[in-house]
Image (cartoon, grey):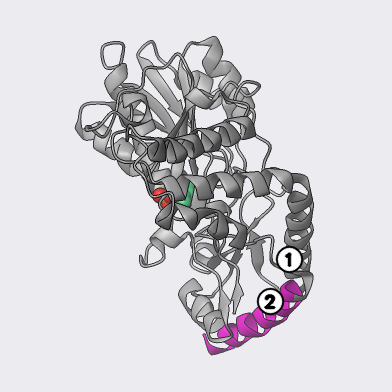
Amino acid sequence: MLYLDHAATTATHPEVIKEMLPFFQDVYSNPSGSYEFAADSRLMLERARKVIADSIHAKPEEIFFTGSGTEADNWALVGMARLKKEQGKHIITSTIEHHAILRTCQYLEKKGYEITYLPVDHDGCVSVEDVERNIRPDTILISIMYANNEIGTLQPVERIGEFARKKHIVFHTDAVQAYLHEPIDVVKQSIDLLSVSAHKFQGPKGTGFLYVRENIALPSLLHGGNQERKRRAGTENVAGIVGMAKAVSIGMHNLSENHEKLLSLRNYLIDRILKEIPDVVLNGSLENRLDANVSFGFRGIESQSLILFLDMEGICVSGGSACTSSEKSISHVLQAIGLPEEYARGTIRISLGVENTLEEMTYFVETLKELVAQLREFS
Ligand SMILES: *Cc1c(COP(=O)(O)O)cnc(C)c1O
């Protein structure tokens, strides 16, 4: 099998699994216990928090563990809406956010909040000027993703952060796709809230975190016990958190090496596919692009057929994104970049992982060329 859908999820790193195992059987204590045995898992939670905080230049007390990237996104938005409801009910986001953001915004609209969905250009990029033009006295939050999960475009996070800070508006970014691909510094980039999910970087599924800048009293979504300094109730997923921290250590240690490797594989795909296959477009920005993502629209092809044909050759890719693959309609992201329908219908996403090789890319391009030609012949 050739797995090229790392934006959907990744295999858990063997070292991560090894690190997690003792926390199911030996150190299974509830960190809230009062005995020495509980202190062991408590210590590991705090070590994990430190490793994660260091990776984004935050303080350990600014890191809150969650059950997913989706939960972190929901918490950031709903929490801020509740915290600031007396000051205003206006939120700025973009049209190309992940559904964890967009559907939470729709929920907030039903609760009386007003959301401005900023458009993007043909590359999928939000303009800082648009952010500036759309703020109002009652704007309480700006939420713009760091990197798009479908087309890989990186947003001008630092410039948006700088502007938001100047205007005293809280700035959240969904960094699920960018984390451990791009260097992140929440201080330098003026980020107030940041969402991450472990299973996108060789950590376990069902674990994530939200960074909350220290002076923001984000209220809890979940009510119950006093875990996470009373901000996120529920017994901590100790094994998952330990595994996530291990994946962070590995990813941080190899950050630049992995980045270079992914970039060269990605650029190889872009060069060959654009050169050797007719009637194809690269979706998203060429310069401001995630190292692991390519997205191509093939004219006159149904992406579902291409995905099926590739699957029969043992190759896993996806359409727009994993979350919309069962839907027939064109993804909101491809609509937002104004991609003509004949290309949007034939769009696939290839997302790379560090275990991928150049030989695999060669095999992929050769197979893709044949299948695209076959499908075009049939239609
Ligand atoms: C995967 C993803 C999420 C959701 O994370 P889960 O941990 O799977 O809930 C949110 N935002 C983006 C950009 C993603 O790619």
- Foreground: 70 or 160? 70
Judge the density around disc 1: few (<14), some (14-19), many (≥20) Cα neighbours within 10 Å. Answer: some
Q: Position of residue 202 (x, y in %)?
A: 57, 56
The answer to whether residue 90 of the structure is visible from this angle is: yes
Image quadrant assignment for residue 248? top right
Q: Quadrant of residue 187?
A: top right
Answer whether labels 1 and 2 touch (C-beta < 8 Å).
yes
Magenta range is: 360-379
Q: Which residue is under mark 2?
A: 364
- The alpha-carbon separation of the residues under discs 1 and 2 comes to 9 Å
Residue at 41% across / 22% down in the picture?
141
Residue designated by label 1 = 269
Could you tell me the amino acid type at mark 2? Answer: Phe
The answer to which image quadrant residue 235 occupies is: top left
Task: Please give left or right for residue 51 compared with residue 278 in the image.
Answer: left
Indicate the position of residue 261 as horizontal and vertical percent values: 77, 57
> What secondary structure do most residues of the magenta stretch adopt?
helix
Return the residue nearer the eye: 342 or 325.
325
Where does the image place residue 324, in percent across and percent down from the top left? 40, 60
